[in-house]
Amino acid sequence: MKKDQYEFSIIIPCRNRCDTLRQVLVALECQTFPQRAFQVIVIDDQSTDGTDVFLANFQKQTCLNLTALAGKGTTAGAARNTGLEKACGEQILFLDADTIPHKNLLIQHQSWQHHFGDKTCIVGRVCMSESLKKAEQSRVNEAATKYDKQCTAELPWPEYRTANTSIAREICLRAGGFDSRLPAAEDTEFASRLVKLGVRFFFVRDIEVVHHHPMDEKGYFHKGILYGRAIALWYRKAPEHRAVLVHRYGVYAPELKKYRKVKHIFRRFFINSLSVPILVSTARFIRSTWFEMSNHVYKCVYRYYVRQAFRSSLSDITTGG
């Protein structure tokens, strides 16, 4: 295929999300944007739920320009890089296998890309699926931002996340793609390199996708561990970002401001390996009657796992373990 053959290349990494991937692809079939002007690249990242069989059958009957690639099963960043290598579109649009787009998604991304001009990354809104009952989830909408009530807003680069975002392919390649070593936060780290190329990030509320990803407390806390490990790797490789990282993710490091260090000490006194099981049991018990407090407790425990994983991973990296 020739480069720039399409206006958009939609890159979707997928691992064991076959049920929602089907909904994502059907929604892309219904786009108001001309199908000849975009391609869809799905990276099956070593799924074990029959995603490969589903994609093979779906390719036979879909009208989409659909390419299915095999990922290495390592990280989401590595999977997206696999998609970038095969992309032929002028613009890259990142989706996840559980973010279901509105029918006007592509035409809105195109319109706003033209509006803001070169070196622009458009960041759409990610809404939690209404079909997921809050009481059954261990997280609410982590993709929500403080800008969600604004029609448009320019975002600082740490607010970037990949789902429902578009950016020129040439800029993605110049930035070197995603850091495939990071098990999480690879999108924010990617943004830290994009901004060095002069990229500006603009949030547009009306560009919507629906995020349908059920997550129990075990999955939620494991995600915290992955973030802690990723932040440790990023912290070591990019000293210029250390102050941003310790502030954003609440990890303890020399760059933490003095009053935050005091706060961190108090936090460790109340949230530790002995208290976490009690806190989780309490949050679970009050989930249906006092959701807001339950959710706050879950977030505190999640951050505990981030901090613990950061500390242990940083120690391993420093000692070469």
Image (cartoon, helix red, strand yellow):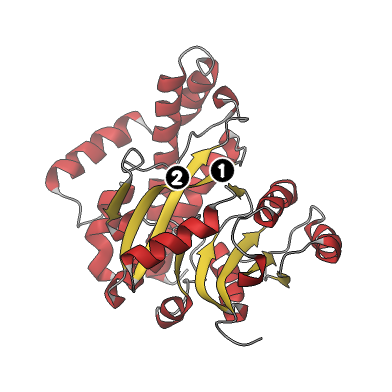
Q: Give the structural element (helix, strand or loop) at label 1.
A: strand
Q: Are marks 1 and 2 in contact (CB under 8 Å)?
A: yes
From the viewer's perspective, tell me whether residue 259 is left or right of residue 138.
left
Mark 1 → mark 2, Cα distance in angstroms:
9 Å
Q: Which mark is residue 143?
A: 2
Q: Which residue is mark 1?
A: 211
Q: Nearer the viewer, residue 229 or 241?
A: 241
Circle 1: is it few (<14), some (14-19), or many (20+) Cα within 10 Å?
many
Asked whether residue 219 appears in the rendered view, the answer is: yes
From the viewer's perspective, tell me whether residue 316 is left or right of residue 72.
left
Residue lying at 39% horizontally and 41% vertically, measured from the top left? 303
x, y percentage for residue 115? 34, 63
Residue lying at 54% horizontally and 40% vertically, measured from the top left? 220
From the viewer's perspective, tell me whether residue 298 is left or right of residue 48.
left
x, y percentage for residue 170? 45, 81
x, y percentage for residue 182? 48, 65
